[in-house]
Each structure stands twice: as structure tokens, then as C-alpha cells.
Image: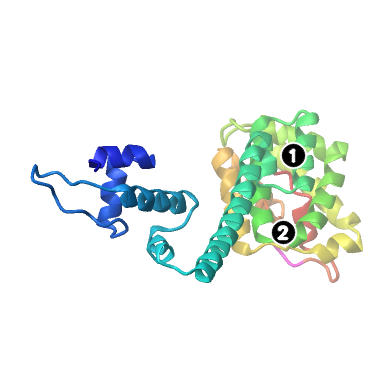
Amino acid sequence: MLTISQLASYAGVTVRAVRHYHAKGLLPEPGRDQSGYRRYDAAAVVELIRIRTLAEAGVPLARVRELLVAGEAEFAAAVDEVDRRLRAEIRDRQRHRTRIARLAAGESLVLPPVAVAYVDRMRELGFPERLVEIERDSWIMIAAQVPEQLPAMMAIKHRQIEDPTLRRLYLDVGELADCTADDPRLPALADRVVAFIEAAVAQADVDDDAAGQPVSDDLVALLDEAFVEHFPCAPRLFRLLEQRGWTGWTNIRRTCPEPAGAALGRAQASRPE
């Protein structure tokens, strides 16, 4: 006859596990001998090993009791069910491992390849990291809301970033990241932003016009707020743009109606974020 410690040792579990199985009603608790100790026989060892094996195989303890008394056919069906569940869990864990492995790749965890390529290109062209991060975070939010629109939008952005005029404008905006609202460079920057936007609107093709403004007004407001948070001079820059007939930033648009046939949405694709 075995003590609880000896039983646990034979079955390869802890004493605490034996007591847990007692509490769950999986393993009958024997009476005490004259010395006050519980004694276990060989049958208890076999039963405990069966419990341990089922539990280690991933069978929930609530099902272990059923399987211990199940017939051959019922036991086989239950094991098949457990196997299917485990295989599904393994697939889920493999997907999780893949996502975790992608953490090292930075932006690729939450951005599709076309947007990652755009962010990488910004770095290649020497854009300040703060500007890159704002752009990256903006596209993370846009991709989550309108993933189906992203390829067309990114095609426009990839074309724009190769435009020397817009690229210089981006870089100049980045240099103003820490400037104050009274920085004397802001009016000239506002003039250049307006000049670029008006030229882009005048030259926009039919495809760009059809793209319109695919993101919601709420997201546009959120993206504008993010820009303001990173650039203390942004509120004054916005006021300067309004004085020149334009409002907004993520979705720059005229403050007064455009001539018939003009596309208000085209300005958004050309914004220097």
C-alpha cells in the first residue's frame, strides 16, 4: 500500500495534483488506516496515470471523468474530438508565432506591404523620423478602416513622393516640427502648400478624382489631431491656410465652393503630412 507521496511519485505527478483530482472527483479518495494515513493500491496508480495522460493530452478535466468510464467507441470518438480541437489550437498558435516573429520587422506587423514600401521609401529619401512616424501611424489607422481602398491610395502616394517639389515640401514641414507659432518661416510654407495643392487640383486626372475622400470625417479629424500633437506650429499653419482659401490638413479643401466640375477630394491625396 502506498502513501499519497508514493502514489504521486509512481504516477509522475505532484501531491498537489493528486489532491486536486480528489477534489474534482476524478480519483476516489481512500479511507485512512489505523495511523490516520490514506493508503493507495495498484489500481489507484493505474487510474492516476490514466487521468494524468488524458490531462496532458489536452482533455479538459470536465471530460476526463466521462472518458474514464466510456466505452471503446465513445472513447475513440471523444479522442478524435480532442485531436481536432488540439490541431485547431496548434494552427492558431502557429499564426500567433508568425505575427510575433513579424514584430522584428516593425511596420510590417500592422501595415500591408505596399504601405511598408512607402514608409521605407520615406526613410531612403531622408525624411525626419518624426515625419515618418506620423505618416506610418496615419496609414495604420487608414488601413484598418478602409483596407480595400489602400492600394489605390498608396499608388497615389508613391507617385507623389517621387515628385521633387512635394518631397522638398515634406522635408521643410519636417524641419518645422519643433518651431513655435511665431516662426517667420510659416507664412512662406503656407504659400508653398497652397501652391502645390492648387497645382495638384488643376492637374489631377480622372482616376484621382474618382478616389475622392474614402475615409470617414471622424478619422480625418483624428489624423489632423495627431499632426497637431506632433507639430506645435500646426494650429497657426492651419489658420494661414484658411486665410489663403483652404481648410483642413488630412483632407485639405477649399473654404468656398469650387468652380463647377472641380474635385475637392483630390487635395487630400496631395497633402504634406
Name the residue located 76 percent from the left edge and 35 percent from the top edge: 120
Residue 179 rendering spot, x and y as whole percentages: 59, 31
Residue 45 in the image: above or below residue 78: above
Give the total of numbered labels.
2
| Residue at mark 1 | 119
Residue 98 rendering spot, x and y as whole percentages: 66, 43
Residue 147 is marked as 2
Name the residue located 67 percent from the left edge and 51 percent from the top edge: 249
Q: How crowded is mark 2: few (under 14 residues within 10 Å), some or many (20 or more)?
A: some
Considering the whole magenta stretch, tell me its main secondary structure: loop
Residue numbers of the magenta segment: 253-257
**Residue 256 is one of the magenta-drawn residues:** yes
Residue 220 placement, left or right of 31: right
Q: Which quadrant of the figure has residue 192?
A: top right
Judging from the image, the colouring scheme is rainbow
Q: Distance between the residues labelled 2 and 1?
A: 17 Å
- Asked whether the residues under the numbered discs 2 and 1 touch, taking CB atoms below 8 Å apart as contact, a structural biologist would say no
Residue 156 at least partly seen: yes
At numbered mark 1, what does the secondary structure look like: helix, strand or loop? helix
Q: Which amino acid does label 1 sit on?
A: Val
Name the residue located 65 percent from the left edge and 56 percent from the top edge: 144
- Depth check: 190 or 58 in front? 58
Residue 223 in the image: above or below residue 232: below
**Residue 146 is one of the magenta-drawn residues:** no
Q: Residues within 10 Å of mark 1 (few under 14, many from 20)?
A: many
Q: Which quadrant of the figure has residue 88?
A: bottom right
Residue 235 at least partly seen: no
Q: Which amino acid does label 2 sit on?
A: Pro
Of the 4 image quadrants, the one containing the N terminus is top left
* N-terminal label among 2 and 1: 1
- Depth check: 86 or 35 in front? 35
